[in-house]
Amino acid sequence: MAVNILMTPSFSLPHDIYFWGQDRSGNLIPMLAHCLYIFTGWQPVVLVSIVHYLILAAGFWALMRFVKSGYGRFVVALVWFLPPWHFIEFLLILYGIQASCMILALNFLDRSFGTRVQWKCIAWLSCSCLMFIVAVWVSDMVLISLIAVLMTAVLYLTAARKIPGSLPVWRGLLIPAFCIVFWTFTGYLVLHYAKMISTPVLAYDKGFVADSASILSSLTIVITSVSRVFLFSSESNIESVFAWVFFVSLFFVIILKEQYVKTFPGITEKPWFYFFLCDALLTIIAVMSSSWVAANGSGRRYFTTFFISSFICLVLWLENLPNQKSKKIFQVALMIVMITGSLSGIFRFYYPEIKPSRIRVISALKSLGNIGIIAEYWNSYMSGSSDPVHIKTTPHEKDYVRNPDLVEEVLKQPKIYLIKDGWLDSFPDTIVQFRKTLRKKGACIHIADAWLNRYEIIKR
């Protein structure tokens, strides 16, 4: 999030096409925020927040094409904008943006199916393909959703063949098929070029599928985490209530499955229900077997898109149930589940005390004027996000420096500060950083919840 803010004022293509220092995670937010920054001059943190939530809102709007009932839309709004604590990162980093772009693409694709005017069909289909390209640029995980689209299409065409007159004339499909091939080839070329000019990360390219030991380790982490939630031993007790209510509700659904086994919609009637079902299943399989996820400790953030797809699928299934008393019971139970889950995501920021936003805390650094900061990785880029125009930051030379250009900007600042938190035990009299000898100047200060000391470059 901090790097998105830092990129906004100085965003440029092709240098910033991907997240600094890697060839993954397309910078959609900084690119759009930069355009607004040029015209408004507003603070980058404000612009990044506006763009981020506008994209989330656009994704939610696109999803309303598939969720028809007012009840379903309200539940999906809770899932989308107020997820439970364990899935709060859907709002914070690229996973919500990825999901929004993907659902926008599906919305356009569905609109192309819904029109019989060929030029409108091609226009909507082209918009869909373009949005899929953007989605894959934002996150490679969208490739899983593309596979789910293909699986759903195969299932749909297989079922539709058995219904006379339900399939379109093949001759009429030639132009849409050519359109898809054209955009697929174009997207491949654009993304391939983007990766070629970006910084490769060897850790990404060691193979997708993890070994059996890593998969077992990921499974153990997930089971342990889920168990802690059910035993009221996680970070949020309210989330434990959410988990138990959901489990009990699911238990009754399973018990009554004989009554509702025929209520699953046909794929020719509700193809998007099956898409979200396939997407959820493929995502959980991919995440659990991924070597990259295992190497990063199977963080809960990787499961956010699985959670979203699963709940959309559940809402679509509920909409298809006949209007009986048991349907009302399920709806009430699901509403209680989601309200409880939403409270678990909010509660930790307000109880037992109101926690100030991180940007408010680090904004105290603006009182130091035009400065450069060298710090430990997690304290470096974040420290500059309150005012990236006047505060230049970089990790120290032995840490993960994502953008070497920022190093030069830090060393050119009139005042240079070191943050010792997470890096130094004490401030040394002199220290060598990036082939420059820095000498301590004055006493250390405590500001923005960190210890800083000013240094100056010794000129030779």
Image (cartoon, rainbow, N blue to C red):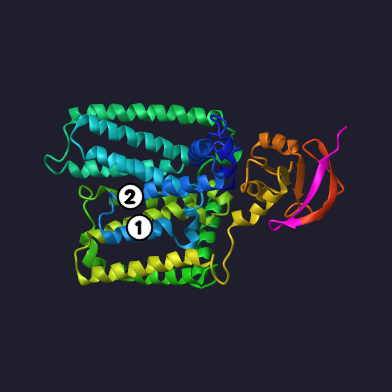
Find residue 134 and report its image quarter: top left
Please give the name of the residue rendered at 72% of the width and 56% of the height, measured from the top-left corner: 447
**Foreground pick, 28 / 398:** 28
Find residue 311 and report its image quarter: bottom left
**Foreground pick, 341 / 393:** 393
Please give the name of the residue rendered at 37% of the width and 57% of the height, measured from the top-left corner: 77
- Callout 1 touching callout 2 (CB < 8 Å): yes
Direction from residue 227 to residue 113 in the image, left or right: left
Q: Is 175 above or below relative to 74?
A: above
Mark closest to the chain's N terminus, 1 or 2: 2
For the C terminus, the quadrant is: top right
Q: Which amino acid, mark 1?
A: Val
Q: Secondary structure at mark 2?
A: helix
Residue 448 forms part of the magenta stretch: yes
Residue that mark 1 sits on? 76
Mark 1 neighbour density, 10 Å: few (under 14) some (14–19) many (20 or more):
many
Residue that mark 2 sits on? 63
For residue 206, say whether it is visible.
no
Residue 127 forms part of the magenta stretch: no
Q: Where does residue 197 sit, x and y in percent of width and height?
A: 56, 28
Q: Main secondary structure of the magenta part?
A: strand
Please give the name of the residue rendered at 40% of the width and 46% of the height, measured from the top-left corner: 100
Q: Which amino acid, mark 2?
A: Leu
Looking at the rendering, the stretch of residues picked out in magenta corresponds to 446-460
